[in-house]
């Protein structure tokens, strides 16, 4: 291996090592940024979890309060055991369960009750405050009001504390990296880079000096003859193949042109203008014959109708002038009849 090639390989190796060091620095910096990003994301995720837990706890408390109110309202739909026992021992229950001997007493009681009912003024009881449902509703409203008031005070207190903290916060941007791992590593890498550059500069100066010495002792000689190389041989073979291919293509075109010219010279133009020997000609003859027969039949029918009409007109005694032969309409009709007969005769 020549000295020039060796120096070239050394230079490429140094460049490769330099690129690897730069890539390593970028990778370490990216890892540091990724670590900081992950820490921020973890803090944000924790805050979101805490907020979600607080929201769920508030929803659970609200649901529990509403369930308690619903249970109270539901329990008011049924008669309690104490009320049922009291009803069983009442005077009404005793009278209702007596035998037929008590009918008179029941009738008297009913008559008295009917008098009371007749003297009663109708009124709709729309006040549920004196019932179990009304009591439960009042209690639920009081609980809701107290809870909303406590929630309002808590939110106001938290907002005041947050506003106080915001007012006392001084914005400080930590743009000094001397206390972080990346700053320490950056200083170490700067020192290593400085020493490495010094060594590379010395090696490069020595290599440049040797190259400069060799260049001064070298005599310029340009090899512009490719015929003695593989490229020249390939070029000659390609030229021969191209000439052969072009010659074959020219011979083929000449042969095809001669055949085409011979075909043109021996061809005679002939235009088939007789359609009677084809299907279209035969159909045309059939249609012409049918048309001629149909026109003759129509003319015969029209002549018969005209003759019958004339005979009818001759038998009629007109009280008015119904002879139009001497009028313009009659003259026109005569002209039409004469024209129609001429056409029929021609057909």
Image: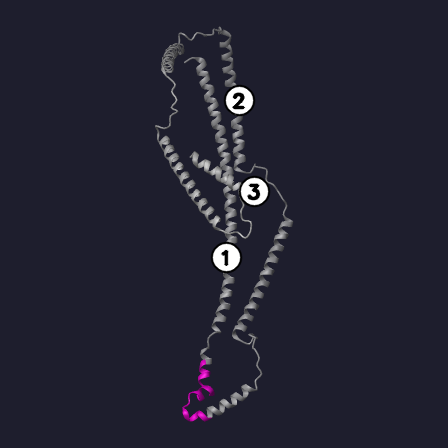
| On-image quarter of the N terminus | top left
Q: Nearer the viewer, residue 312 or 219?
A: 312
Q: Residue at x 39, y 34 (%)?
A: 288
Q: Nearer the viewer, residue 251 or 139?
A: 251
In the rendered structure, the answer to whether residue 21 lies left or right of residue 234 reads right
Q: Position of residue 241 (x, y in %)?
A: 37, 12
Whether the magenta-drawn stretch holds residue 96 is answered as yes
Whether the magenta-drawn stretch holds residue 136 is answered as no
Residue 56's disc is 1
Q: Residue at x 41, y 92 (%)?
A: 100
Magenta residues?
Answer: 84-104
Residue 198's disc is 2
Q: Nearer the viewer, residue 300 or 40?
A: 300
Q: CA distance from mark 1 to mark 2?
A: 64 Å
Its colouring scheme is one colour
Which structural element holds mark 1? helix
Q: Residue at x 52, y 53 (%)?
A: 51
């Amino acid at each position: 291996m020549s000295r020039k090639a060796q120096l070239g390989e050394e230079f490429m190796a140094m460049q490769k090592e330099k690129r690897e060091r730069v890539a390593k620095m970028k990778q370490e910096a990216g890892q540091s940024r990724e670590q900081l990003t992950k820490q921020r994301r973890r803090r944000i995720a924790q805050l979101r979890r805490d907020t979600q837990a607080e929201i769920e706890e508030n929803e659970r408390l609200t649901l529990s309060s509403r369930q308690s109110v619903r249970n109270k309202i539901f329990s008011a739909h049924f008669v309690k055991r104490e009320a049922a026992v009291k009803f069983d021992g009442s005077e009404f229950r005793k009278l209702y369960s007596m035998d037929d001997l008590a009918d008179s007493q029941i009738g008297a009681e009913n008559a008295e009750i009917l008098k009371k009912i007749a003297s009663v003024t109708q009124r709709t009881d729309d006040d549920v405050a004196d019932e179990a449902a009304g009591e439960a509703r009042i209690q639920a409203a009081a609980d809701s009001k107290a809870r909303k008031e406590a929630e309002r005070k808590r939110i106001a207190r938290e907002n005041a504390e947050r506003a106080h903290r915001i007012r006392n916060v001084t914005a400080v941007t930590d743009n000094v990296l001397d206390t972080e791992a990346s700053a320490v590593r950056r200083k170490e890498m700067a020192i290593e880079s400085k020493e490495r550059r010094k060594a590379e500069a010395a090696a490069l100066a020595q290599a440049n000096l040797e190259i400069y010495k060799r260049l001064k002792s070298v005599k310029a000689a340009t090899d512009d003859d490719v015929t003695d190389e593989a490229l020249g041989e390939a070029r000659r073979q390609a030229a021969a193949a191209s000439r052969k291919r072009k010659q074959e293509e020219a011979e083929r075109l000449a042969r095809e042109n001669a055949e085409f010219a011979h075909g043109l010279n021996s061809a005679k133009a002939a235009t088939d203008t007789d359609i009677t020997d084809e299907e279209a000609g035969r159909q045309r003859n059939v249609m012409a014959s049918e048309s001629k027969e149909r026109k003759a039949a129509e003319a015969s029918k029209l002549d018969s109708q005209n003759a019958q009409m004339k005979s009818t007109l001759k038998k009629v005694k007109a009280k008015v002038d119904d002879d139009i032969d001497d009028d313009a309409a009659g003259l026109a009709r005569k002209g039409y009849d004469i024209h129609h007969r001429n056409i029929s005769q021609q057909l």
